[in-house]
Image: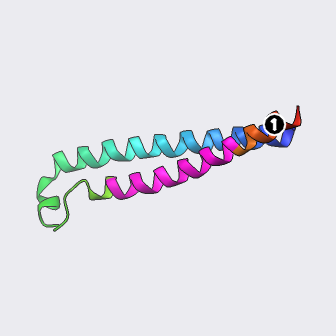
Amino acid sequence: MKNYQTLNTVLNCIIGSFIGVFLARSVYVYWDYTTHPDLYAVSSAPWYTSIQIFGIIVAIIVGVAMVLKILIRKKLTAGK
């Protein structure tokens, strides 16, 4: 049972870390766009494309972690 609680804590840290990195990176990309708009004008893709791609990756990772957390919760409640 303790192993499941440890895994749950690790998953919480992973979820929080990825969301925090996503938010910080999004703010940085926006700041960089407002500071250097000419660099982004050269690109054929919009300036926010990297935010969207990273957001999709983070959503997949957080989704997998949430599914694992649900499975762990079911395992813990079934063991009681």
Whether residue 34 is situated above or below residue 56 in the rendered picture? above
Q: Nearer the viewer, residue 79 or 15?
A: 79
Question: What span is colored magenta in the figure?
Answer: 52-70
Q: Position of residue 18 (x, y in %)?
A: 51, 46
Q: Who's the residue at 31% across and 41% down the image?
A: 27
Q: Position of residue 17 (x, y in %)?
A: 54, 43
Q: What residue lies at 27% left-to-right and 58% top-to-bottom?
A: 49
At x 17%, y 45%, the residue is: 34
Residue 7 coordinates in the image, percent (x, y): 75, 44
Is 7 colored magenta in this rendering?
no
Residue 41 x %, y %? 11, 61
- Coloring scheme used: rainbow
Q: Amino acid at mark 1?
A: Leu
Q: Quadrant of the C terminus?
A: top right
Residue 54: in magenta span: yes
Residue occupying the far front of the picture: 78
Q: How many marks?
A: 1
Circle 1 SS class: helix
**In the figure, 69 relative to 54: above or below?**
above
| Left or right, residue 10 beside residue 50 | right
Query: Which residue position holds label 1?
Result: 76
Q: In which image quadrant can residue 47 be found?
A: bottom left
Q: Is 80 on the left or on the right of 46, as rendered?
A: right
Q: Which secondary structure class fits the magenta region best?
A: helix
